[in-house]
Amino acid sequence: MMSKKSQSHVEIVLSFLLFIGVLIFVFAIINPAKTNGGVSEIRSVEEELIKNLSISVEKISIIVGNVGDCYTGSVVQALGGNRYVEYQDPEKTRKYTIYFNNIFEERKNVSCMGGNINFTIGTSMNETIIYYNSIKKLKEHYENDYSSLKDNLGITGDFAFKFRYINERSDIWWNKSWNKRKRVNITSGGSFVNFPVSIRINREDEMKANYGDLRFVYEEEELDYKIENYTNSDVLIWVKIPVLLPGVNPVFMYYDNPSATKIQNPESVWDESYKGVWHLNSTGTHYDSTSNNNHGTKMLNLIEKSDGAIDGCIESSSTDEGYVEITSPSGLESTDSFTISAFFNLDVDDIRGIIKRGDSNHDEYSLYVDNGNVCLGYSNNSGDYFLKSSESYNDGEWHHASGIFRTNSPQAVLVVDGNLVNYTNRTYDSPPSMQLQVIGALNSSESTFFRKKIDEARISNQVRSIPWLNQSYVMIKYMNEYVVFGGEETYDPNKAKELRKGIPEISIFEKTIFGTEKYSKVLPVRVIDKSGRINELMMNIVSW
């Protein structure tokens, strides 16, 4: 039997515990657990985020720039669903597009992963592209510090890393009003921004007769596209992909929405650097697909709608000859740097014109063939200069010829089928004006009319890289190998809901890290889900 003294002690302890319980209860009422961003939810989000990074995150982006400059105003712009970030310096003299693969290796650590170093300077004169698989590899490449990287990018003072992440989950349905979709895998040999891709699609029974229900989605972003031509059995479409990275790039094609209307945006498929894009599949008038409206006119007895490299094309023969003329083209004025290109199919061995642009003063640039060899020429009152391929392309097959003129060395570059075939450092004066462009001839003399076929002629006021031109060639020449369709998927609301369970619908997390030496610290990270809800969590972030 308990003594009164012991009983008194127990009562005191129980009273104290009851008092503590009341305090906890009152504190809980005054400070309720947050339903969004509370400790338990933060831990859950953090665990799911880190746990799934290695399997669900395909790309991490990183940007390097001047502290205080690169994050002010609209200097930094995230594009293409954050698979890359574009940095424009304050003076707007250079652009830096920096790509990163998955840099997460272990839970709660931004750490090192293996991978080959792939460092590329330039898809254009004013752009620097860096593509690495590992921060550690980046560090090693630059001799354990960032001084040479800073010099390379023209950065002075401190700089920052900015990590951006998007959860690329193929199980998320873009819009439930579309009942069907297919995955389109596009293979790329390099890193390209705003690349126009040609896709030929076989008709499905659920598609509308005019294909107006087609939509293309890349990382949940609806893409600009243009229908070039369609029949009852298939359709040829151009789609602008915000960014292509080396390897397979997934795009989803949605269809089967009876109430959808055709909303293609053809002019936006070609960025502002394109000054003329001619598919050459019309009759009479050959329309420019860009917003410049540099439409061409059929001259003489030109054969039209012949079988082309991708669709219809123009053709000249010994009995039916002609060309396409663009008079007073806009946006094609004298420029320091530009690229001209076209597909051609040849069956004659003398001098024949593919594309010429120039004026009445004999100032002109031209892409032509001479005895089967592809040539890039420049003429002015001082004389004629040209580059010539060593190989003949008079074989009855489709080939792709490109001429690049630039201010930097080499100043003239000839590319055939995506391969460099000749170049020169000779200085070329820009002609005073560009009054005329001709496709399929060098002048009005029949002896210069191209003999056989020309397709997909283009001109841009940007220096296209050789990898870009190679990708342009293979995407058309070998379309079925570079554009591969997956199986048909049908929207299932129950399945879609189930697939979302247990995994936060995380769209972006980002954090800026400053400093030039190794940096390791637990930092708050803001996670924004698809509904715009904000979750705060802590993460150990390390940079080298």
Image: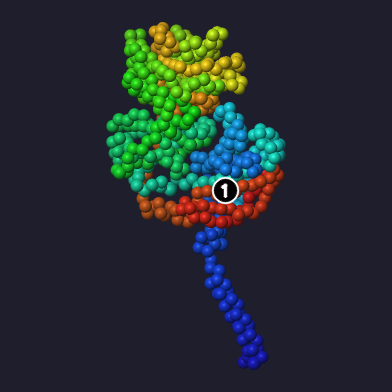
In the depicted view, which residue is nearer to us: 351 or 72? 72
Q: Residue at x 55, y 74 (%)?
A: 25
In the depicted view, which residue is nearer to us: 314 or 66? 66
**Label 1 is placed on what type of residue?**
Glu
Counting labels gives 1
The C terminus lies in quadrant: top right
Spot occupied by residue 180 in the image (x, y as percentages of width and height) = 35, 43
Q: Which element type, helix, strand or loop, lies under badge 1?
A: strand
Residue 495 in view here? yes
Q: Quadrant of residue 225?
A: top left
Spot occupied by residue 38 in the image (x, y as percentages of width and height) = 54, 62
Residue 99 in view here? no
Spot occupied by residue 50 in the image (x, y as percentages of width and height) = 56, 52
Relative side of 475 to 262, left or right: right
Question: Where 419 falls versus 89 (above or below)?
Answer: above
Q: Residues within 10 Å of mark 1 (few under 14, many from 20)?
A: some
Q: Quadrant of residue 152?
A: top right
Q: Quadrant of residue 420?
A: top right
The N terminus lies in quadrant: bottom right
Q: Which residue is mark 1?
A: 510
